[in-house]
Amino acid sequence: MAERINAIAVFARTAPEQKVCIIKALKTDGHVAAMTGDGEIADIGIAMGISGTDVAKEAASMVLTDDNFSIIVKAVKEGRGIYDNMVKFVRFQSSTNIGATLCRRSSIVRYAGAVYRRAIAVDQHHHERPVGDVAGSRSGPQR
C-alpha cells in the first residue's frame, strides 16, 4: 500500500480498518495525514460539527462547523498565508535589529576613544584639586 499511496487521489466509503491502513501508509511516506472520525492514529483528527458526536468533537484537532470539507482547503491556504507573513515579519525584525545593534556598537567604539581622551585632558588641567575636594572647599587660595 505504501508504494501506491501517492498515485491515489481520493478514498471513499472506507471502513475504519482501511482508514488506519491508509494513514499508516501516508505517514510512512512522510505525509501529514488528517482523518475524520476516530483520528487518534492521524496527525490531525477531524470531527463534524453538525453530525459528529460530542466525544469526537472533544478528541478532534479540527471541528468542521458546517460539515463542509471544502473549508479544510480554505483553512490550509489561510494558515499558510499567516505562516508566510510571520516568517517575513521575523526576518524583517531580525535584520532591522541586527543593523541597529551594529550601528550602536560601532558608534560606541568610534566615540569611546574621544570621550576617554577628553576625560584625561580635563583631569590633567585640574590635577591640583581632586574631584572629592570640590564640594567642601573655599574659593580662592588655600591657607
Image: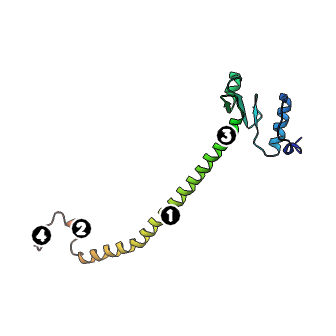
Q: Earlier in the sequence, mark 4 or mark 3?
A: 3
**From the viewer's perspective, is 84 left or right of 134?**
right
Q: CA distance from mark 4 to mark 3?
A: 83 Å
Name the quadrant of the C terminus. bottom left
Q: CA distance from mark 3 to mark 1?
A: 38 Å
Say which quarter of the image contains residue 113.
bottom left
Residue bearing mark 2: 131
Marker disc for residue 99: 1
Residue bearing mark 4: 139
Name the quadrant of the N terminus. top right
Q: Earlier in the sequence, mark 2 or mark 1?
A: 1
The residue positioned 12% from the left and 67% from the top of the image is 138
Q: Position of residue 55 (x, y in %)?
A: 70, 23
**SS class, disc 4:** loop
Residue bearing mark 3: 74
Marker disc for residue 127: none
Between 104 and 48, which is closer to the camera in this rendering? 48
The residue positioned 85% from the left and 35% from the top of the image is 21
**Amino acid carrying mark 1 in the image:** Gly
Q: Nearer the viewer, mark 3 or mark 1?
A: 3
For the rendered model, the colour scheme is rainbow
Q: Earlier in the sequence, mark 3 or mark 1?
A: 3
Say which quarter of the image contains residue 131.
bottom left
- Contact? badges 2 and 1 (CB < 8 Å): no
